[in-house]
Amino acid sequence: MPKVSVIGAGNVGSEVARRIVEKDLADVVLVDIVEGVPQGKALDILQSAPVEGFDKKIEGSNDYAMIQDSDIVVVTAGLARKPGMTREDLVMKNGQIIKEVSKNIKKHAPKSMVVMVTNPLDVMAQLCWKTTGFENNRVIGMAGILDTSRFICFLSAETKVPADKIEAVVLGGHGDAMVPLIDYTFIDGRPVKEVIAEETLAAIVQRTRDGGAEIVKLLKTGSAYYAPSSSAVEMVDCILNDNKKILPCSAYLKGQYGLLDVFIGVPVKVGASGAEEIIELKLTDEEKHELHRSARVIKDTILLCEK
Ligand code: TXD
């Protein structure tokens, strides 16, 4: 029976756990440092099984020993930025959390694949990879699926074309640093530039970049978790079922796209071995420039965690 552990039983972690058991993908262990929370949430989800009709087990714990024999560990542990906290403070704090979580993954689930969700995403994926010492295919970050999904939602709303008839790819760092590939965006088979006016398209790209912030502003406390959890579970599904789908994910680059030793969003073939292949698309000079700029921001942020 496949087993997935989810570290962090907050908004994203508990939704990831719920979606995994509801889709009958795997048994789940939910781990958090706060006593009672993972246990309570897991029990609550379990009690929906007779109604939802799933037969997977879910258990909550504060003990990392419970993640033993996991096929995949999804990492959502971390802090959200609080008032008065600088971006650097947050990076350092989440960096400490991810180092601790990664040491526990190495100790208790040394054969697992890791799906990183905690922000700043690309940096935390790289930190986890370094701390666990895992092969680079075994750590993948979730961001591009979410950014692409948001982009497609807005394109669909603008054109009234159903989302499943829209193709798009968003690369680069998560959030502000994302790079949507306009030449790979098609609305019902037609290049997006032929369907949407330049200014409207630029506004949609900007709204996608600010996608997370728009939700934070509306919610007032906390940040997005329904769409982020869908995206993370898509990766879990691909790994467990060896789907080999090409998904935009944060993966380790060793020369692809002219980038070395950095985790960044690129199209990745995701299967049983994790990030099985990095797909190199042809980029315009401007997109290449943006991707490299995005990589520089990620590399600078990694240095902060290493201080
Ligand atoms: O696209 C993406 N990658 C993202 C990333 C989309 C949405 C959310 N994104 C990030 O995920 C967000 O910026 C955060 O860094 C994480 C988790 O977001 P969530 O909304 O779930 O945050 P919560 O609700 O505050 O939950 C975090 C939980 C909380 O229960 C803490 O007690 C727990 O993490 N936590 C820990 N668990 C285990 N071990 C340690 N050390 C630990 N520290 C905190």
Image: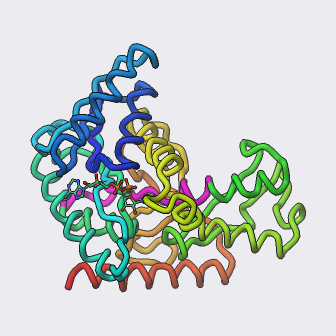
Which image quadrant: the N terminus?
A: top left
Q: Residue at x 76, y 74 (%)?
A: 202
Residue appearing at x 35%, y 72% in the figure: 82
Q: Identify the image quadrant of residue 26.
A: top left
In the rendered image, the vertical position of residue 9 relative to residue 41, given as above or below: below
Q: Residue 157 lies in magenta, yes or no?
A: no
Question: How many discs appear?
Answer: 0
Give x and y (percent) for residue 120: 39, 70
Residue 143 within the segment the image draws in magenta: yes
Q: Quadrant of residue 101?
A: bottom left
Scheme of image coloration: rainbow
Q: Nearer the viewer, residue 119 or 110?
A: 119
When the figure is inspected, residue 307 is found, relative to residue 201, above or below; the finding is below
Decide if residue 46 is in sight here.
yes
Where does the image place residue 217, in percent across and percent down from the top left? Answer: 55, 66
At 85% from the left edge and 55% from the top edge, which residue is drawn?
190
Q: Residue at x 24, y 72 (%)?
A: 93
Task: Depth check: give the residue in front, 201 or 114.
Answer: 201
Q: Quadrant of ligand 1?
A: bottom left
In the image, residue 8 lies at what x, y percent? Answer: 28, 50
Whether residue 270 can be seen here: no
Q: Is residue 280 left or right of residue 199?
A: left
Residue 36, above or below 276: above
Residues in magenta? 132-149
Q: In this orientation, which residue lies closer to the viewer: 234 or 79?
A: 79
User: Does residue 180 appear left or right of residue 56 in this picture?
Assistant: right
The location of residue 178, given as percent across then percent down, is: 56, 71
Q: Is residue 52 depicted above or below 119 in this figure?
A: above
Quarter of the image for residue 212 reads: bottom right
